[in-house]
Amino acid sequence: MLLWSLLVIFDAVTEQADSLTLVAPSSVFEGDSIVLKCQGEQNWKIQKMAYHKDNKELSVFKKLSDFLIQSAVLSDSGNYFCSTKGQLLFWDKTSNIVKIKVQELFQHPVLTASSFQPIEGGPVSLKCETRRSPQRLDVQLQFCFFRENQVLGSGWSSSPELQISAVWSEDTGSYWCEAETVTHRIRKQSLQSQIHVQRIPISNVSLEIRAPGGQVTEGQKLILLCSVAGGTGNVTFSWYREATGTSMGKKTQRSLSADLEIPAVKESDAGKYYCRADNGHVPIQSKVVNIPVRIPVSRPVLTLRSPGAQAAVGDLLELHCEALRGSPPILYQFYHEDVTLGNSSAPSGGGASFNLSLTAEHSGNYSCEANNGLGAQCSEAVPVSISGPDGYRRDLMTAGVLWGLFGVLGFTGVALMLYALFHKISGESSATDEPRGASRPNPQEFTYSSPTPDMEELQPVYVNVGSVDVDVVYSQVWSIQQPEGSANIRTLLENKDSQVIYSSVKKS
């Protein structure tokens, strides 16, 4: 009893010195560290100690210890105190109450936009607006923008603004932003805002033809360009042939035009075409465009036509050139040995002819060329041999000269022989001879002598054969064997007609 009384007296004396005190910072901002210290009690008296907030126990220790809040948030604001439980009942103590108010470092951000209903394809500017505490204006923040849980732009940035160059219908959705300290202790998010992108319907759809040289040619490339004057977003372009109504192709892209390429056009591709464009509203169709396909000329065929089976001088030769394929008009050129004779046009296609009056110089090779502006084609060469009066006369003249030479030689031989005989009988024949001029026949007439019965048969030495309806006179030359007896010779000589020798003479 005595010991107990002494302890009670000692505790009463030291109570004032051993009272508990809670020490806390006077100013606290979001993100700051808070250290709570409970002081004024000796560890040997403590069985346990605890920290409290708003009468709720936060943490319990077996000795005096500090309580740490690593990064304060607004919800950490409240009334704090500490308490100890001694080994004796009268050693239980409670500290003073400290009110802690955590101040906002910066306000919750607010997302603003240049337009919450932007036109599709247009730009949009987003801004994450917040305000720092006047006591902490030096705090550094960074910002990030989101759409449907997807990060926009390059992510976190020191700039509170984000520029979007173009928005599309698929960009419609919920947007928000976040702001945080560079130390990552405090992060705050704005409220979500709806951005609805407005799509503009397409208008004025047109179909344009693009081909090399401005005209559609068989075998070459053809481009069908479908375009719209207005409209936004992804546009689906499709091409159709009017005759069938089936789609030739389809493209979806974010542009005001698209093209369909036909690598090599065929003749059967000629016809009427149109295209359609659709960006989610009502599909719009272009006007129908007629596409003619021009056909290059094929290799032409040259046909020669003359009055007879054989082309002759003076004939009218028809040269007919025709390309079996090729779009009109077609221009035909005619050639003789690569020298142009002339040309002829076929405005509606088919062939064309050229007439030529033949001379001896027109023998040789003939060809023709067809051209409709898509490339020229040449025919195979056709040889022509000319016969007729001019060539025939040259042949007869040559033969006549040769026969004339031989005739002159024969005439000279006979004349020499007769000259010798005339000298022997000159006395007898001089009284009876008549003047030669009286019985000499016309040298321009074709006269043939007939042999007397008592003469041996006359043998023709040279005979010119052929038509006499020319400008050369031809004759026969006869050789005579001398008969026995001078009387027979005289008789023969008196028959002057039978001894006249003719030769070829050129008419003047």
Image: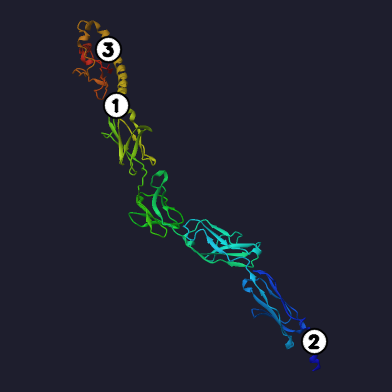
The disc, 1 or 3, on the residue closer to the chain's N-terminal end is 1
Q: Secondary structure at mark 3?
A: helix
Residue 151 location, x and y as percent?
A: 56, 63
Q: Dot 2, how many residues are within 10 Å of its Cα: few (below 14), some (14-19), or many (20+)? A: few
20 horizontally vs 347: left or right: right
Q: Amino acid at mark 2?
A: Phe
> Is any atom of residue 337 visible in this view?
no
Q: Amino acid at mark 3?
A: Leu
Q: Nearer the viewer, residue 277 or 174?
A: 174
Residue holding disc 1: 392
Viewport quadrant of the C terminus? top left
Q: Nearer the viewer, residue 445 or 453?
A: 445
Q: Secondary structure at mark 2?
A: helix
Measured Cα–Cα span from mark 1 to mark 3: 38 Å
401 horizontally vs 11: left or right: left
**Which is in the foreground here, disc 1 or disc 2?**
2
Mark linked to residue 418: 3
**Which is in the foreground here, disc 1 or disc 3?**
1
The disc, 1 or 2, on the residue closer to the chain's N-terminal end is 2
Residue 465 location, x and y as percent?
A: 26, 24
